Structure formats: structure tokens, C-alpha cells
Image (tube, rainbow, N blue to C red):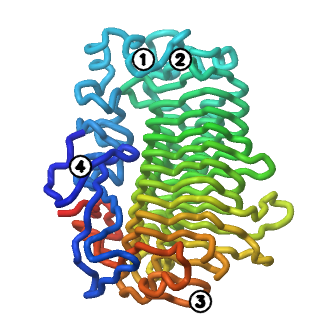
């Protein structure tokens, strides 16, 4: 990836979640003639982080739709198809893999895979090699085994079903597409299903359902140390559905889109809590509900470095039990509701959903943009919603969100507040600091508590933990609400 090429005054660079991030000393530009600073001197400024022109895919035009880090046209959901190695523009097809490394085993070693047995699964219509199926070899897989699917579309009820497979930390079981080949999993119930497994990696598949409705592209239950990477997931009821007793599970470097009936990623727990879940460096768009939702108890959920846009509900929804977790370094924009939501609510007794407290969470270093128009043209418009929303809709009204920290974000809304709290009791336990806030409607609703709106300068009278925020235009290149139907037109770089 090339470094940021534009000139920015008082800027430094670092990489967060695969994006080039720039810390920028903000100018005195203001929105609609308004500029307010709370708790800062004239020369101080919040730590702001904005996507540079050379982002996840060399610019937002591609970065909102597909991943191509080496700029060769190949990648996850990229125009030319899957990339054999997205860190090397010279290695993108099966032929180039063998041309550079000589053997597939040598390439896998380069990728860091410690290969034991190497198995091939060939499409039934193929003619070369042994015609093994995953159903035949799956039960016998051991730590260090690698299963490679050759090109083709594989159909079935559960195309790739793993049950009670046990890898190890140093020798996981790897199930992958042949590097650079287009391997499509098209399941009637799910395309990848993992239950009661440990230490597995799934890599490089296109998970695409084309006929009727499918419950989930990927489902994960009661499993630990499972990694999904370099996947395109589309055309399902929901993209990834993972529930109950999950630990050390990661979704990374994937594009999850056009799963139009439910959440793009739906994670959760009922009576068996989860821990150490990571959603990192993904692009998530066109979900029928939220881009990402976690419902239930989880400790150390990390949602980092993602681009989450154009979803029918909000960007990130955390409900009924998420604690000691972080939403950090994401670009969340053009969704139909809030950017980030913390919500406790009552459900039917039989559902197993309980409104647990949600303390000690961090929302930091994000760009959250809430516009005026629905990306899909639906009747529900986003213009009145907050960038960050803390909401207790339970009957007892006792949910606790203490220890929540909202810091170092760029929060942009239309008519809604940048931050909303449904109840006054949240004020004493929530830290809001060092954010840049911007509203089309001006600074009069920088914060909403219960039904009362506050200008930014008045917020510090509410709590000593609300300080150091600023109301001003961040100066992004193009974040016009008129781009609602063309997310690729958004440009969060600073000219």
C-alpha cells in the first residue's frame, strides 16, 4: 500500500485496522458559521482520525465495495476475482502462485500455515485429481490438516459442515479456496456451518446463495478460536450468524453485503456468554437490518477497522449484555439509523433474551456520519438519528451503562444529536471527551439527554466527564448527503 500522498499540516500517520489513519490538527473552519469549543484553549485540538485518500483500497471509491490492498484488481469481491496474495501485486492467480513459489505447499508456508496432511476437494464437474468431498474427509481431519477446494460452485443443504473438529493453536485445521480460484459455496440452509469445534481457519471462499432464501451464509455455534478471513458473503437471510458459548472467534478481511433480510453480522448469547470476539477490517453493507449486532453477554468484543455503510437499520448495535468491549477505528456512514447503538430492552420470556447491564465499553477513533436520506429509498430516513445512542427501553428502567467512554471520534449528523442518552442517570457514568461534533442543523443539539437538548458549551455543566469536545466542520473532501445512493462517492480524506 502506498503512503498518503497529500500534504496535511500537523499530521502524523499510523495504521489502524488496515487503513492508513491520519491524526490531524483541525483548522478553525466551522459548519454553517458555528464553531464551539468546550474545555479547550484556542490552540488545543482533539485527536482526530480520518481516512486518507490511500485507504483500504486506494480510495473510498473502491474501499466501500471491495478489498484490494495491493491494487492489482484482484481481491475480496474485487472486479477481477479473488486474489491469491493481496499483499503482493505479482501473485494473484493460481499460475502466478506456482510461478513464484513452485508449489502450493511453499506458498502455504509463506502464508504461515503449518501444513500436516494436504487434502483437495474438487468440484463434481471437474476431471483432474481425486474427487473427494468435504463430507468424506471432514470427520477425519486432525490438527495441521489443510483442505483446499478447487474452483466451482458447490451446492447442498450445509455445503461445508464442521462438527467437533479439533485443531491446536500452533496447528489449526485450515479449510480454504485454492489461492486465486473462484470457489463458491451455495448452501440451502447455510454454506459454512461450524459447531463444537476449536482452532479452525476458513479462507478465501465466496459464500453466495442464489435460489430462494438461506438462513445464514455462515453459522458458528459453541466453538472457540475459529477464524474467517478473505470471504465474500452475500445473498443470504443474514451474512454471519454466530451464537452461544463463542470464544476467540474472528471475522477479518471480508466483504459481507446484500444479505437483505436481517443483520449483516448477527452475534449473540443467551444462557452461555461469549468472550474475545473480533470483527476486524471488513466491509459490511446492504444488510436488511443492522450492519453488525451483538445481542447478549460478551466480554472483549472488538469491532475495529471496518467500513460499515448503507444498511437498513444502524451501523453497530450492541444490546443486552455487551461489556468491557470496544468499537474503534471504524468508518460508519450512510446507514438508515444510528451509527453506534447501546440498547437494553425487554423481550418475551420464552426468547431467552435478558436485559443485562452493559458497562465499561469504549467508542473511540471512529468516523460516524449520519445523513438525511435512506440509502435504499425507503420511508425511514436517518436525518433525526444520533451518531451514538445510549438507550434503555426496559420497563424497569434500571439498565447500567457506567464506564462507557466516547472519545476521539468524528461525529456528524443531520438534524439528530451527535450523542443521545435516553435517561439522565446515564450522564454521571459516561465519559464524552475529545470528539469533533458536527451537525447540519447547527450546535443546538450536540447532546440530547432524555428529551432535553444541549449546546456543546452547556454540556460541561452536566458532568466533569464531558469535556474537550469541539463543534466544527472536519473538512472532509466529499461527504455530501446527496451521495446517499452512491456510497462510492464519499471521500473522508482531507484535501
Numbered disc 4: secondary structure: loop
Q: Quick one: label 4 or label 1, which is nearer the N terminus?
A: 4
* Residue at 55%, 9% in the rendered image: 117
**Could you classify mark 1 by the number of other residues whose Cα lies within 10 Å: few (under 14), some (14-19), or many (20 or more)?**
some
Q: Are the residues flagged by discs 2 and 4 in contact, CB closer than 8 Å?
A: no
289 or 110, which lies in front?
A: 110
Judging by the rendered image, the residue that carries numbered circle 1 is 108
Numbered disc 1: secondary structure: helix
Image quadrant in which the C terminus is located = bottom left
Q: CA distance from mark 1 to mark 3?
A: 57 Å
Q: Quick one: label 3 or label 2, which is nearer the N terminus?
A: 2
Q: Is the residue 18 above or below the residue 120 in the image? A: below
320 or 61, which lies in front?
A: 320
Residue 316 in the image: state x and y as whole percent: 53, 61
Image quadrant in which the N terminus is located = top left
Judging by the rendered image, the residue that carries numbered circle 4 is 54
Residue 285 numbered mark, or none: none
* Residue at 32%, 32% in the rendered image: 86
Q: Are the residues flagged by discs 1 and 2 in contact, CB closer than 8 Å?
A: yes
Amino acid at each position: 500500500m502506498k503512503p498518503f500522498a497529500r500534504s496535511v499540516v500537523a499530521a502524523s500517520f499510523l495504521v489502524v485496522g488496515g487503513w492508513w489513519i491520519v491524526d490531524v490538527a483541525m483548522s478553525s473552519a466551522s459548519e454553517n458559521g458555528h464553531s464551539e469549543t468546550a474545555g479547550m484553549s484556542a490552540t488545543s485540538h482533539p485527536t482526530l482520525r480520518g481516512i486518507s485518500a490511500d485507504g483500504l483500497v486506494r480510495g473510498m471509491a473502491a474501499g466501500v465495495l471491495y478489498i484490494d490492498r495491493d491494487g492489482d484488481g484482484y481481491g475480496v469481491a474485487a472486479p477481477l476475482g479473488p486474489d491469491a496474495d493481496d499483499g503482493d501485486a505479482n501473485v494473484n492467480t493460481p499460475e502466478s502462485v506456482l510461478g513464484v513459489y513452485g508449489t502450493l505447499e511453499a506458498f502455504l508456508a509463506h502464508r504461515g500455515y503449518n501444513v500436516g496432511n494436504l487434502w483437495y476437494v474438487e468440484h463434481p464437474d471437474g476431471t483432474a485429481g481425486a474427487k473427494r468431498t468435504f463430507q468424506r474427509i471432514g470427520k477425519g481431519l486432525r490438527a495441521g490438516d489443510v483442505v483446499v477446494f478447487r474452483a466451482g460452485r458447490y451446492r447442498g443443504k450445509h455445503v461445508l459442515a464442521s462438527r467437533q473438529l479439533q485443531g491446536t493453536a500452533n496447528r489449526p485445521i485450515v479449510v480454504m479456496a485454492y489461492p486465486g480460484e473462484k470457489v463458491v459455496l451455495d448452501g440451502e440452509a447455510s454454506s459454512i456451518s461450524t459447531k463444537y469445534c476449536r482452532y479452525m481457519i476458513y479462507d478465501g471462499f465466496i459464500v453466495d446463495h442464489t435460489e430462494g432464501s438461506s438462513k445464514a451464509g455462515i453459522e458458528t455455534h459453541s466453538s472457540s478460536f475459529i477464524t474467517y478471513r478473505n470471504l465474500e458473503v452475500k445473498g443470504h437471510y443474514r451474512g454471519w450468524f454466530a451464537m452461544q458459548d463463542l470464544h476467540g472467534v474472528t471475522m477479518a478481511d471480508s466483504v459481507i453485503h446484500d444479505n437483505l433480510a436481517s443483520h449483516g453480522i448477527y452475534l449473540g448469547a443467551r444462557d452461555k456468554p461469549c468472550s474475545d470476539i473480533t470483527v476486524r477490517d471488513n466491509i459490511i453493507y446492504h444488510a436488511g437490518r443492522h450492519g453488525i449486532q451483538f445481542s447478549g453477554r460478551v466480554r472483549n468484543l472488538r469491532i475495529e477497522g471496518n467500513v460499515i455503510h448503507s444498511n437498513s437499520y444502524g451501523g453497530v448495535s450492541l444490546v443486552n449484555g455487551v461489556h468491557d468491549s470496544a468499537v474503534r477505528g471504524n468508518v460508519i456512514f450512510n446507514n438508515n439509523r444510528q451509527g453506534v447503538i447501546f440498547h437494553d430492552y425487554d423481550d418475551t420470556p420464552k426468547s431467552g433474551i435478558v436485559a443485562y447491564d452493559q458497562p465499561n465499553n469504549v467508542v473511540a477513533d471512529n468516523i460516524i456520519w449520519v445523513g438525511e436520506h435512506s440509502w435504499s429509498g425507503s420511508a425511514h430516513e436517518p436525518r433525526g438519528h444520533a451518531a451514538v445512542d445510549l438507550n434503555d427501553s426496559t420497563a424497569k428502567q434500571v439498565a447500567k451503562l457506567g464506564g462507557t467512554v466516547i472519545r476521539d471520534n468524528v461525529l456528524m449528523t443531520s438534524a439528530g444529536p451527535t450523542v443521545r442518552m435516553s435517561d439522565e442517570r446515564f450522564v454521571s457514568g459516561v465519559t464524552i471527551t475529545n470528539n469533533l461534533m458536527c451537525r447540519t442543523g447547527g450546535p443546538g443539539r450536540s447532546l440530547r439527554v432524555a428529551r432535553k437538548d444541549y449546546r456543546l458549551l452547556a454540556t460541561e455543566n452536566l458532568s466533569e466527564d464531558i469535556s474537550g469536545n469541539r463543534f466544527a466542520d472536519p473538512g472532509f473532501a466529499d461527504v455530501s448527503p446527496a451521495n446517499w445512493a452512491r456510497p462510492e462517492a464519499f471521500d473522508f480524506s482531507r484535501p
